[in-house]
Amino acid sequence: MRYALNSILAAVLLLGGAFAAFADNVKTDYDHGADFSKFHTYSWGTVKTANPFYVERIKQAVDKQLQAKGWQLVTSGADTTIFATDRVHNEKELESIYDGMGGGWGGGWGWGGWGLGGGGLMGEETTDTINQRVGKLVVDIFETGSKKLLWRGSSSADLSNNSSKNTKNLDKDVAKMLKDFPPKAKKS
C-alpha cells in the first residue's frame, strides 16, 4: 500500500513538472495603439535561420496562417513587412531517477522515514546532466512605411533529431502564435 501511494505521489510530481515544461512556449505582444484593420498586405523581409531549409518552412507556415485571415502576400507596396529569426542552442537539463522508493513514514508506524532515521521518501537518486537542443523562433511584423514594430510572436521548443517532427511542431507553434491575429481594437 505504501509503495502504491509513493508511486502515485512520484507520478503526480513528474507529470506536473512535465506540464510546466511544455506550458506557454508561445508568446505574443503588439502595439496596443495600432489599428490593425488598415493592414491587409505583407511582404517578407529577412528570415535568418540556423538551418537554411527552415527559411522556406517558416515562410510557408506564416503565409498559411495570414492568408487564412485574408492577408495577401505582395512583392511590392505592402502595408507590412515580416522578419523572422531563429536561434538554436543547447540547454543543460537535469534528469533524476529515483529507485527503491524509500521507507515512507518509517518502519510501519512513527516518523522514522522523513529524515529522522530511515530510508527517506524517495530512496536512492541518480541525476544525469543532458544537453537538449532548444529552438526559439521570433516573428516580427513591421509597418512598412514607418518601420514601426506592430506585432511580435515567439516560440521555443525542444528540438528533435527528426526534421519532419520539428517541421510539424513549427507549423503548430506558428498556428498558435497567429491564432488571435490580428489583434482587435480595444473599446474605450
Image: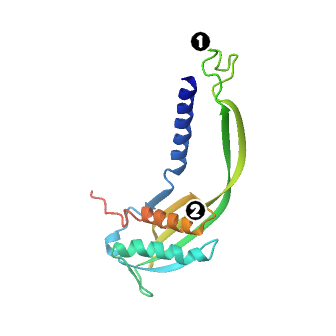
Q: CA distance from mark 1 to mark 2?
A: 51 Å
Tell me if residue 152 can be seen. Answer: no
Instruction: Say which residue appears at 70% left-offset and 34% top-offset.
Output: 125
The location of residue 6, given as percent across then percent down, is 57, 28
Which image quarter holds the C terminus? bottom left
Crowd rating for badge 2 (residues with CA inside 10 Å; few <14, some 14–19, many 20+):
some
| Left or right: residue 124 compared with residue 81 | right
Residue under circle 2?
A: 136
Image vertical order of residue 123 relative to residue 152, above or below:
above
Q: Amino acid at mark 1?
A: Trp
Q: Amino acid at mark 2?
A: Lys
Depth-wise, is mark 1 or mark 2 nearer the camera?
1
Q: Earlier in the sequence, mark 1 or mark 2?
A: 1
The residue at the far top in this view is 110
Image vertical order of residue 84 relative to residue 14, above or below:
below
Which image quarter holds the N terminus? top right
Q: Say what secondary structure mark 1 lies in.
A: loop
> Is residue 144 or residue 13 the one in the foreground?
13
Describe the colour scheme in one phrase. Answer: rainbow
Q: Say what secondary structure mark 2 lies in.
A: strand
Tell me if residue 16 can be seen. Answer: yes
Residue under circle 1?
A: 109
